[in-house]
Amino acid sequence: MEENNKSKLDALTLKDNFMFGAVMCEPENCRPFLEMALGISIGKLDVSIEKSLVYHPEYKGVRLDVEASDENHTRFNVEMQVVPKPALERRARYYHSQIDMELLVRGGGYGNLPDACVIFICDFDPFDCGKYRYTFRNVCLEEQDFILRDGLTTMFLSTCGENPDEVPAELVSFLKFVGLSLQESTKESEDGYVRQLQAAVRRVKASREWEARFVIFEEMLQEQREAGRAEGKVEDIIILLEGLPGEVPEDLREYLFSEKDSGVLHGYLKLAASASSVEEFARQIRQ
């Protein structure tokens, strides 16, 4: 592994998506977290290690989350969120739909859909209400004591909570640990579960297997960034073309979006800026 990547891996804390996925792939680390977050007891937990680092074309990029199921077939999806992202609530909705569609594609009926819980751990307060934990289920607006039995739970945990008396002490300890800097996170904690996580972080950083996975992860991120830059240039080219005489045909749009070379697209951008018409631009790029 290149020294630069090794240094990057050593600098990770639990709040970093890669490290969180690596640590929580171990059921003995994931199960206590789910139990204290949800206030339930889980006898057996299966964590999908192979899904901890995947590329989702339909999701438009790298997605690092933890997927697990218990002995009752309840599905759990957990993801770390370091910075606020737009439409976080709708992101949770998408995750729920992905869980359901995967199971329905296998041939199961609606009645066989298991309970599902999506959890975001946020290093910020997603709703600015000072809570460590926000739990959502569907309720009837006319009878708010009536909860819709659709089996769906969405939870947002915040490292910035201000209500320690309203949530379990061990959950507060965990969330405070998540929010620590690299230097602070290496100091031995008084909390037993946090010490367990600290040991797991050290194992990941010393593991050749996880080093190799981290290299792949970094390569995927780089490809995603480059694809994003290329797509941005294509959009700029099309904006210029739409200001010229002539229609921008669909096949030309597809041709431009299929080009991934940043240098080529930069040349196309110059051509679009100097062309007198869409037809002239199309002729020049295909010469």
Image (spheres, helix red, strand yellow):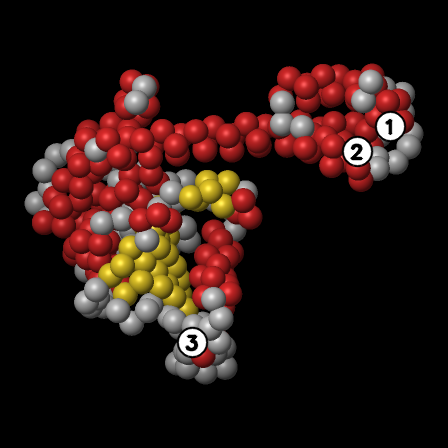
Q: Amino acid at mark 2?
A: Leu
Q: Which residue is mark 3?
A: 112
Q: Amino acid at mark 1?
A: Val
Q: Mark 3: which secondary structure?
A: helix
Instruction: Give the x, y percent position of residue 16.
Output: 32, 38
Residue in the foreground of this view, choosing between 112 and 241:
112
Q: Which residue is mark 2?
A: 252
**Distance of mark 1 from mark 3, alpha carbons?**
54 Å
Q: Amino acid at mark 3?
A: Asn
Q: Quadrant of the C terminus?
A: top right
Look at the numbered discs 1 and 3 and tell me whether their residues touch, using CB distance below 8 Å. Answer: no
Residue at figure coordinates x 50%, y 81% from the top left: 142
Q: Quadrant of residue 42?
A: bottom left
From the viewer's perspective, tell me whether residue 247 is left or right of residue 206. right
Residue at figure coordinates x 31%, y 44% from the top left: 21
Residue at figure coordinates x 35%, y 40% from the top left: 17
Instruction: Give the x, y percent position of residue 201.
Output: 20, 38
Going from the N terminus, do you reach mark 1 or mark 3 first?
Answer: 3
Can residue 279 be seen by looking at this rendering?
Answer: yes
Instruction: Give the x, y percent position of residue 171.
Output: 21, 55
Q: Which residue is mark 1?
A: 278
From the viewer's perspective, tell me whether residue 178 is left or right of residue 265. left
Q: Mark 1: which secondary structure?
A: helix
Q: Quadrant of residue 255?
A: top right
